[in-house]
Image (tube, rainbow, N blue to C red):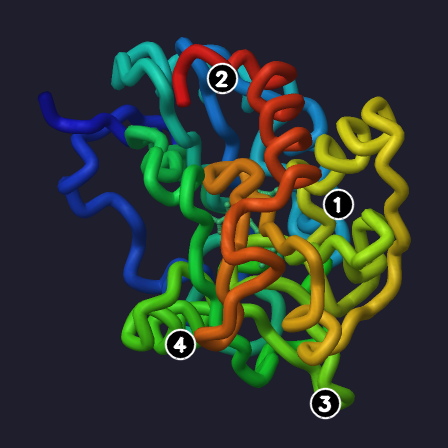
């Protein structure tokens, strides 16, 4: 069955050309996106994803393409038409279509595309053994808090990580401190059992899974300190992990080829993963 996309008011087979050549998302990466997980057809954390979408749009002075209620209906209808049990909903909003000119067009109508695909959850082996990450220079801009579709440095970093046999790249600022992954937030657990992760700011995306992880850690009595950590600290950590909507809470067991802790997923990481799976209704799925 062909996947169906919502494109500016129409539901179309995903392969059908439907976006204008002069869409500013296409020509300038002038737009934002969201990725929402659906379990048994039900979106998770939908309101928080929509809050973040609205914030990203506001920061770039792009109007919401429709009311929040209408957008919820479009998401539900796109899910219905695709009938995928555990899915990832992708929402992209661009500033709209206009003759190419860097300046904001007058009266542009924002473009909205919604697609759905099968959720690429981690494989059992990745959860049981943990994954490798490599550290690479963070070459992104200073507004990584905006979920912009301009992802070229992320794409290049992820590709380089894959070519080095790693699942993810952890990006490192000019002072040698980890910001986040190319598509996930980054955490270590120090020898005292405290989680350390970068504070919110222009250097990272405020992950929705990060919010959930904080709630799970609080409930489990695991302390979190929000501060930047160095690559050297990461290599000496007891545990490491990453979080994102589709990677969930994923143990990291090697950084730049060096084992972390005893080389197996850490106990705190596993406890928080279990709590997260439970809270998301994923315990029987993963
Ligand atoms: N990525 N940091 C970056 C740079 C990201 O791209 C993402 C998400 C996250 C985690 O955010 P959340 O927990 O809200 O998914 C952090 C999405 C999934 C993507 O680009 O596919």
Looking at the image, tell me whether mark 4 or mark 2 is earlier in sequence order.
4
Could you say where residue 82 lies in the image, as x and y percent from the top left? Answer: 26, 18
Q: Which mark is residue 280?
A: none
Residue at the outermost front position: 262
Could you say where residue 12 lies in the image, as x and y percent from the top left? Answer: 22, 29
Using the numbered discs, state the Cα–Cα distance from disc 3 to disc 2 in whole angstroms: 38 Å
Q: Quadrant of residue 185?
A: bottom right
Residue assigned mark 3 = 174
Using the numbered discs, state the Cα–Cα distance from disc 4 to disc 2 in whole angstroms: 31 Å
Q: Nearer the viewer, mark 4 or mark 1?
A: 4
Kindly identify the residue that appears in the image at 87 percent across and 46 percent down. 224
Q: Nearer the viewer, residue 194 or 137?
A: 194
Answer with left or right where residue 155 lies relative to residue 217: left
Residue assigned mark 2 = 282
- Look at the numbered disc 2 and give the secondary structure of its residue: loop
Q: Nearer the viewer, mark 4 or mark 2?
A: 2
Could you say where residue 242 lies in the image, as x and y percent from the top left? Answer: 59, 51
Q: Nearer the viewer, mark 2 or mark 1?
A: 2
- Quadrant assignment for the C terminus: top left
Residue at the outermost bottom position: 174
Q: Nearer the viewer, residue 94 or 202?
A: 202
Using the numbered discs, state the Cα–Cα distance from disc 3 to disc 4 in whole angstroms: 18 Å
Residue assigned mark 4 = 156
Using the numbered discs, state the Cα–Cα distance from disc 4 to disc 1 in whole angstroms: 26 Å
**Labelled pair 3, 2 in contact (Cβ < 8 Å):** no
Work out whether residue 100 can be spotted. yes
């Amino acid at each position: 069955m062909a996947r169906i996309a919502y494109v500016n008011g129409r539901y179309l087979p995903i392969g059908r050309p439907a976006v204008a050549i002069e869409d500013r998302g296409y020509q300038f990466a002038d737009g934002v996106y969201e990725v929402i997980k659906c379990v048994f057809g039900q979106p998770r954390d939908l309101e928080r994803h929509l809050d973040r979408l609205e914030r990203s749009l506001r920061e770039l002075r792009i109007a919401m393409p429709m009311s929040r209620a209408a957008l919820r209906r479009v998401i539900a209808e796109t899910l219905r038409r695709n009938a995928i049990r555990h899915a990832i909903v992708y929402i992209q909003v661009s500033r709209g279509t206009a003759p190419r000119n860097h300046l904001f067009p007058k009266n542009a109508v924002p473009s909205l595309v919604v697609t759905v695909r099968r959720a690429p959850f981690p494989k059992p082996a990745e959860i049981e053994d943990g994954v490798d990450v490599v550290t690479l220079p963070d070459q992104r801009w200073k507004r990584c808090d905006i979920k912009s579709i301009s992802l070229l440095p992320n794409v290049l970093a992820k590709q380089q990580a894959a070519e080095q046999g790693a699942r993810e790249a952890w990006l490192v600022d000019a002072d040698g401190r980890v910001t986040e992954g190319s598509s996930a937030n980054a955490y270590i657990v120090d020898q005292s059992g405290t989680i350390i992760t970068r504070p919110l700011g222009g250097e990272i995306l405020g992950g929705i899974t990060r919010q959930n992880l904080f709630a799970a850690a609080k409930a489990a009595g695991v302390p979190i300190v929000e501060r930047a950590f160095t690559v050297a600290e990461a290599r000496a950590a007891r545990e490491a992990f990453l979080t994102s909507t589709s990677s969930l809470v994923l143990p990291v067991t090697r950084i730049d080829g060096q084992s972390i802790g005893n080389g197996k997923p850490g106990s705190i990481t596993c406890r928080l993963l279990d709590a997260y799976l439970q809270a998301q209704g994923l315990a029987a799925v993963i």
